[in-house]
Image (spheres, rainbow, N blue to C red):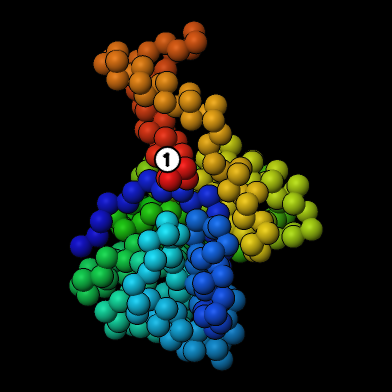
């Protein structure tokens, strides 16, 4: 059976190529909150079988308790390679803790995979990339399609191509906002697309800050040197943590539906985000 999603830092993620398992320990030590073993776009068709076998083998041994979230990005469920990936996951007794689903177009794909994992008895979680027009249109239905979903990822490059717009902040703001809305509606994380220019660290920090401010929980990286800055952007600062703790404590003491702090009216629904801030701060500190 599936388990309830827990609040955890998802400030940064990095891919590790399935074709090169020697890179996996290095990715785990990079400081990223999420390490995703890559079987999709980063692997040539002729190498898919070898990468798949490597990825499955990585999880045969128990994983370290290091607070790094481990995911495998399989191929699209609408393609032969994706079906072979799923068969390999179902065949093993030691499946990856989570799968990332690319090129999703409808909630039925997610439901189908959930049913197969349930039948097999796997507790594998799901992370869904929203990067197609149909997925953007159906993002709320996709978000609610499985209790296994822990995060929605924004696939900005593919989405820009689908929308026929520039791959830039303003043209993609509507798409990003829909994903944040859908993720927040079910209480899971939204993760932004990696910043592709390694020579523009200031631009990456600016893009990450914009993403954070509209509700994203983290952002992808394409190189380990980006991770520290991403973690800093998406880690609640001391002032934010102190304010969250004050709001939580004030509501606990008042036992009412609203309180006034520093002259500002704050209603009880705000507590969910305050609890999340405190939980992330505690995990990061730990």
Which is nearer the eye, 134 or 83? 83
Answer few, some or many: residues within 10 Å of disc 1's Cα (few below 14, many 20 plus, some between 14 and 19): few
Vertical comparison of 205 with 122: above or below: above
Residue located beneath label 1 in the image: 282
Extreme residue toward the front, this view: 286
Picture coordinates of residue 13, whole percent (x, y): 54, 59
Vertical comparison of 235 with 14: above or below: above
Q: Quadrant of the C terminus?
A: top left
Residue 89 shows in this picture = no
SS at mark 1? helix
Picture coordinates of residue 228, whole percent (x, y): 63, 52
Q: Residue at x 50, y 84 (%)?
A: 51
Which is nearer the eye, 114 or 132? 114
Vertical comparison of 214 with 202: above or below: above
Extreme residue toward the bottom, this view: 46
Extreme residue toward the right, this view: 199
How many marks the image carries: the answer is 1
Q: Residue at x 59, y 85 (%)?
A: 44
Q: Residue at x 55, y 67 (%)?
A: 27
Picture coordinates of residue 46, whole percent (x, y): 56, 91
Which is nearer the eye, 273 or 40? 273
Q: Where, by quadrant of the figure, is residue 127 drawn? A: bottom left
Residue 104 shows in this picture = yes
Extreme residue toward the top, this view: 263
Q: Residue at x 48, y 23 (%)?
A: 243
Q: Where, by quadrant of the figure, is residue 197 drawn? A: bottom right
Vertical comparison of 3 with 40: above or below: above
Q: Where, by quadrant of the figure, is residue 252 drawn? A: top left
Left or right: residue 124 compared with residue 220: left
Q: Quadrant of the N terminus?
A: bottom left
Picture coordinates of residue 267, whole percent (x, y): 38, 19
């Amino acid at each position: 059976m599936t388990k309830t999603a827990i609040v955890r830092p998802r400030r940064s993620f990095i891919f590790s190529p399935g074709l090169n398992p020697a890179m996996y320990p290095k990715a785990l030590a990079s400081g990223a909150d999420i390490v995703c073993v890559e079987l999709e776009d980063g692997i040539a068709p002729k190498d898919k079988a070898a990468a798949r076998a490597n990825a499955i083998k990585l999880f045969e041994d128990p994983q370290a308790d290091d607070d790094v979230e481990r995911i495998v990005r399989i191929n699209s469920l609408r393609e032969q390679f994706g079906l072979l990936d799923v068969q390999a996951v179902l065949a093993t007794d030691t499946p990856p803790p989570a799968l990332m689903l690319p090129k999703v177009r409808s909630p039925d794909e997610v439901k189908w995979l959930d049913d197969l994992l349930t039948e097999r008895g796997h507790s594998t979680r799901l992370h869904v990339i929203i990067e197609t027009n149909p997925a953007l249109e159906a993002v709320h239905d996709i978000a609610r399609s499985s209790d296994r979903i822990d995060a929605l990822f924004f696939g900005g490059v593919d989405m820009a191509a689908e929308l026929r717009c520039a791959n830039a902040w303003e043209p993609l703001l509507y798409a990003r906002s829909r994903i944040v809305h859908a993720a927040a509606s079910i209480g899971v994380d939204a993760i932004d697309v990696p910043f592709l220019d390694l020579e523009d660290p200031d631009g990456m920090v600016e893009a990450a800050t914009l993403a954070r401010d509209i509700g994203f929980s983290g952002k992808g990286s394409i190189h380990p040197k980006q991770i520290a800055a991403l973690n800093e952007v998406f880690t609640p600062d001391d002032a934010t943590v102190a304010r969250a703790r004050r709001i939580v404590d004030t509501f606990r003491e008042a036992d009412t539906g609203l309180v006034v702090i520093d002259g500002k009216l704050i209603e009880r629904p705000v507590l969910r985000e305050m609890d999340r801030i405190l939980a992330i701060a505690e995990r990061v500190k730990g």
